[in-house]
Structure formats: structure tokens, C-alpha cells
Amino acid sequence: MDDRQRKKMQHELKLYMEQYFKKKLGKGVDYTKIVIWEDMLIIRGEKFLTDPELYIVETASGKEVVRAARMQVAKQHSIDNVPYFEKLLQAKMIHQTYDIEPEKDFWIHVVVFDRILTDQGISK
């Protein structure tokens, strides 16, 4: 895909992800950024924790409790959405990773596909 198509797809995925989390969790992410580059899809979000979770994160063992719970959410997000990403991008996932940093109210999901998705990733 060329740069214009890439930016359009990134915007569409951003809207999709915001709707997904609002539907599944009842709360959207305040900031979502989608980057499609070479053979990767990178999804990051900030300000997604609820007020009770933010309070729990401030306690001694709270970070790990919230992290464990939100990692389950990330795992389910992957199960629910990777097939959609594969269909949309017409590529198969070959690797993925996701992580949560509750103390920073930040999460990221990186998916690597089996082919180059962008023109920028093609040597000319």
C-alpha cells in the first residue's frame, strides 16, 4: 500500500480499536495510535485504566494485580482481532507481542506479518 492508503488504513484501524474497547470494556482509550510499517502493525494506547485501577496501581502490590488483569484483556483482544487484521491486511501473522505498563497507563500490541505491507518497506 502507498502512503495515502497506509494513512487511511491507520485511521480506520484507530476508529475500529476505539469502538472495540468501548464495546468490550465500557470505556475507550483516551489516546490510540496505529502504525503500519513494513511488515508490522503497531497499536498503542494511553489512558485506558479506570479510576479504581488507577487507585490500585498506587498500592504496593497493585501494579502487578492490574497488569495481570489487563494482560488478560490484551490476550482476548488478540484472539478477537488478529483474524480481522489478517483479513484486512491480506497477510498472516507470524509473531506478536503485547505489554501493559499500568504505572504509566500505557499498552502496546505489535503484530509481525508474513509479507511487507507498505511501499516504504520495499527496496527500490
Image: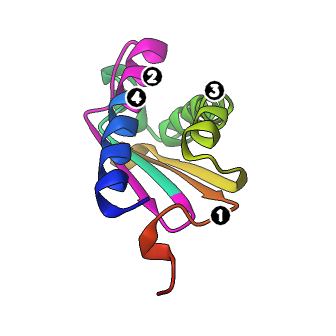
Q: CA distance from mark 4 to mark 3?
A: 12 Å
Determine whether 20 is above or below 98 in the image: above
Do the residues bearing badges 4 and 2 touch, measured as CB atoms within 8 Å? yes
Asked if residue 109 is positioned above or below residue 62 in the image, the reply reads: below
* Residue located at (57% from left, 40% from top): 85
Task: Give the camera-side residue of 92 and 18.
Answer: 92
Amino acid type, residue under disc 2 in the picture: Tyr
Identified at 62% across, 46% down, the residue is 90
Residue to which mark 4 is pinned: 16
Residue 58 appears in view: no
Q: Earlier in the sequence, mark 3 or mark 1?
A: 3
SS of the residue at dot 2? helix
Identify the residue under disc 2: 20
* Mark 2 in CB contact with mark 3 (< 8 angstroms): yes
Which residue type carries mark 1? Arg
Is residue 89 or residue 71 the one in the foreground? 89
Relative to 66, is 83 on the left or the right? right
Structural crowding at the residue carrying mark 3, measured as other residues with C-alpha within 10 Å and reported as few (<14), some (14–19) or many (≥20)? few
